[in-house]
Image (cartoon, grey):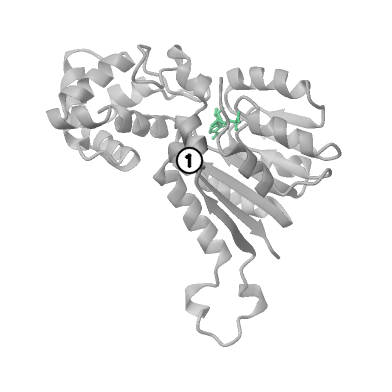
Amino acid sequence: MHESVLLTESIDYLNLNQSSIVVDCTLGYGGHSSHILKKISHGFLYAFDQDSEAIKHAKLKLQAIANNYEIINTNFVNIKEEITKRINQVDGILFDLGVSSPQLDETQRGFSFHKNAKLDMRMNQNQKLTAYDVVNNYSLNQLIKIIKEYGEEKYASSIAKGIINSRKIKPIETTLELADIIKQNVPEKYRRTTHPARKTFQAIRIEVNDELNVFEKALKDSLDLIKVGGRICVITFHSLEDRICKQIFKEVSSIPKQLQNLPLIPDEYQPKFKIIANIKPSDAEIKHNNRSRSARLRVIERSR
Ligand SMILES: C[S@@+](CC[C@H](N)C(=O)[O-])C[C@H]1O[C@@H](n2cnc3c(N)ncnc32)[C@H](O)[C@@H]1O
């Protein structure tokens, strides 16, 4: 079961009315989408997901609630192209990033370092690049770069060297083999504080799904799709995603630096957006759902 994070808060901040047109970029198991549908009896919901398995489950949930929605089975990086084919602008856009609990729990998807599976980590099962390719074909420098940048892992170099040495003997096939190699290539005391494979697995997942580039493009494109008065809500789960969101929101909600000292700011330089919220889950939510501990919700509204 997937427990939606910051559910009440994100739905409230979308500020919906019965006729709202909404895009849920990350349908998942339909938690947020089903709540959105309950609020927009005369509106419409477009819901994206690139995972056919998640869509199968979400369909069952949504069709029991309403029929004013369309599921778009593609990467949300295509949001602009897909939405403008259908409608000019929308009232609300939601991103609830990352993987869902069922994706993590399904052993064969290869996302988890606790369960033995082939190295995969693709959210879209039709995509070519898998975690196996990254682990077995990337150069030492490429591995160091992604483990350092996407995993923020201080032992990136020794982990990458460990991977290279190990694959000289035989290809690294499974999640547990990889987790073991990581463990052997970090200091003893690091093994005890946190699971030593967590950051490297995050890095490989981000690389396989090109998560940061995709999110940055989609969020920028979303700004063009929002009507005046409409809102974008973004739920992130780690600092790399959050940084992208924070920077983009800051840029579009402030007056350009070089103009800030002018006595009068020309109309065309007035920001088009204003920041509405930046919140974390309550202590009660974190206690109830541990997955929410690193989540953050940022909300922006188009003002002109
Ligand atoms: C955290 S889950 C969303 C859960 C959902 N809000 C709910 O309450 O059930 C994220 C979902 O977004 C999908 N996803 C992540 N990145 C995507 C992308 N770039 N394009 C399309 N779907 C994506 C994943 O496949 C996953 O199903």
**Ligand 1, what quadrant?**
top right
* The N terminus sits in image quarter: top right
Quick one: which residue is furthest to the bottom in this view? 263
The part of the image, by quadrant, that contains residue 203 is top left
Quick one: which residue is furthest to the left in this view? 188
User: In this figure, what is the number of numbered marks?
Assistant: 1
Is residue 288 something one can see in this rendering? yes
**In the picture shown, does residue 90 fall above or below 158?**
below
Which amino acid type is shown beneath numbered disc 1? Asp
* Horizontal and vertical percent position of residue 303: 69, 63
* Horizontal and vertical percent position of residue 99: 49, 29
Nearer to the camera, 241 or 130: 241
**In the picture shown, does residue 198 fall above or below 293?**
above
* Horizontal and vertical percent position of residue 64: 78, 20
Tag 1, which secondary structure?
helix
Residue 219 horizontal side relative to residue 121, left or right: right
**In the picture shown, does residue 64 fall above or below 14?**
above
Nearer to the camera, 183 or 2: 2
Nearer to the camera, 49 or 61: 61
Nearer to the camera, 203 or 8: 8
Q: Residues within 10 Å of mark 1 (few under 14, many from 20)?
A: few
Residue identifier under label 1: 283
**In the picture shown, does residue 204 fall above or below 154?**
above
The part of the image, by quadrant, that contains residue 275 is bottom right
Is residue 187 something one can see in this rendering? no
Which residue is depicted at the point 18% across and 19% down?
166
Which residue is depicted at the point 61% across and 49% down?
221
Quick one: which residue is furthest to the right in this view? 42
Residue 187 horizontal side relative to residue 209, left or right: left
* Horizontal and vertical percent position of residue 183: 20, 23
